[in-house]
């Protein structure tokens, strides 16, 4: 497996967790009710924990003497491999919940497939994260259903969020050369199977939420190859400030 792009897989999983955690944590102290404030903070912490594992393994695999912290805090925008949907601004609470659900519906089958990988370190991390993400998916799906099938205003906001975010869902379900190589080696999942599971879950959830599934159309892509929106730069400016200003600083 020495020639397989395992580092890319770890970076894609870890960077998506890290950037989504950074976005989600922006709600701490601002969520509409205390329970949601705590819930979003816990999800962000779970994702940071998963980031530590994925980027730690990526650092080992690249063999350049870097650590998970180095990869998180000392890379420039073009070196990040997160999905574009993770870096989008939070918007209102409904948009944040819809983004979380759309990512969770991809994250769960990805981890479930990776937990069976013959590469033991990949399988170990996926198995460890699967329980947390199972909870994330159940929670976000319930909230999408409650708000979609709620008041006229909550329904309208959830539909607007879904319509706006839909063009960012294709990237997570479409295989590139790296995904194909990993799948053919049996190390990574077949994204066609992930797409089937994702659509099945989303179809059921949206039906219960009385939300209309957008027609497939143009899909943004590029995050997995380091081509990002302008939003990632602002996230990194805030997230990396301390280590950029005071290299090696610790608590």
Image (spheres, rainbow, N blue to C red):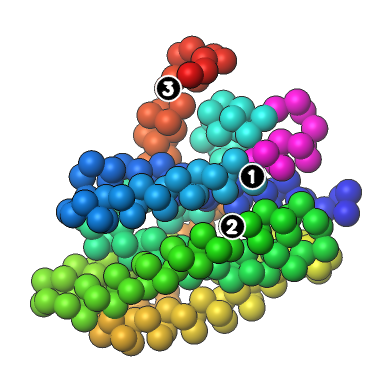
Q: Main secondary structure of the magenta part?
A: helix
Distance in Å between CA atoms under marks 3 and 1: 22 Å
The range drawn in magenta is: 55-66
- Would you say residue 57 sits in the magenta stretch? yes
Q: Mark 2: give few (<14), some (14-19) or many (20+) Cα within 10 Å.
A: many
> Dot 1: what SS?
helix
Residue, x 46% and y 65% (percent of image)? Answer: 135
Mark sitting on residue 241:
3
Q: Quadrant of the N terminus?
A: bottom right
Per the image, the residue denoted by label 2 is: 129
Q: Give the camera-side residue of 115 and 107.
A: 115
Relative to 13, is 103 above or below? below
Per the image, the residue denoted by label 1 is: 53
Is 105 displayed left or right of 64 in the figure? left
Q: First in sequence: mark 3 or mark 2?
A: 2
Q: Residue furthest right?
A: 2
């Amino acid at each position: 497996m020495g020639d397989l792009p395992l580092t890319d897989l770890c970076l894609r999983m870890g960077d998506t967790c890290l950037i989504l955690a950074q976005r989600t944590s922006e709600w701490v102290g601002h969520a509409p009710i205390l329970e949601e404030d705590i819930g979003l903070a816990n999800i962000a912490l779970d994702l940071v924990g998963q980031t530590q594992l994925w980027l730690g393994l990526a650092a080992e695999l690249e063999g350049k003497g870097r650590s998970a912290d180095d990869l998180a805090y000392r890379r420039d925008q073009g070196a990040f491999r997160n999905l574009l949907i993770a870096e989008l601004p939070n918007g209102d609470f409904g948009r944040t919940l819809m983004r979380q659900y759309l990512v969770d519906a991809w994250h769960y089958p990805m981890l479930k497939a990776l937990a069976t990988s013959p590469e033991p370190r990949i399988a170990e991390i996926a198995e460890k994260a699967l329980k947390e993400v199972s909870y994330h998916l159940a929670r976000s799906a319930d909230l999408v259903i409650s708000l979609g099938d709620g008041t006229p205003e909550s329904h309208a906001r959830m539909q607007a969020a879904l319509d706006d975010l839909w063009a960012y869902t294709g990237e997570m379900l479409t295989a590139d050369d790296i995904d194909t190589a990993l799948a053919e080696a049996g190390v990574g999942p077949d994204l066609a199977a992930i797409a089937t599971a994702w659509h099945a879950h989303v179809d059921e959830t949206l039906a219960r939420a009385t939300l209309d599934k957008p027609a497939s159309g143009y899909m943004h892509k590029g995050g997995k190859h380091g081509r990002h929106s302008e939003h990632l730069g602002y996230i990194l400016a805030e997230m990396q400030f301390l280590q950029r200003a005071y290299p090696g600083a610790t608590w």
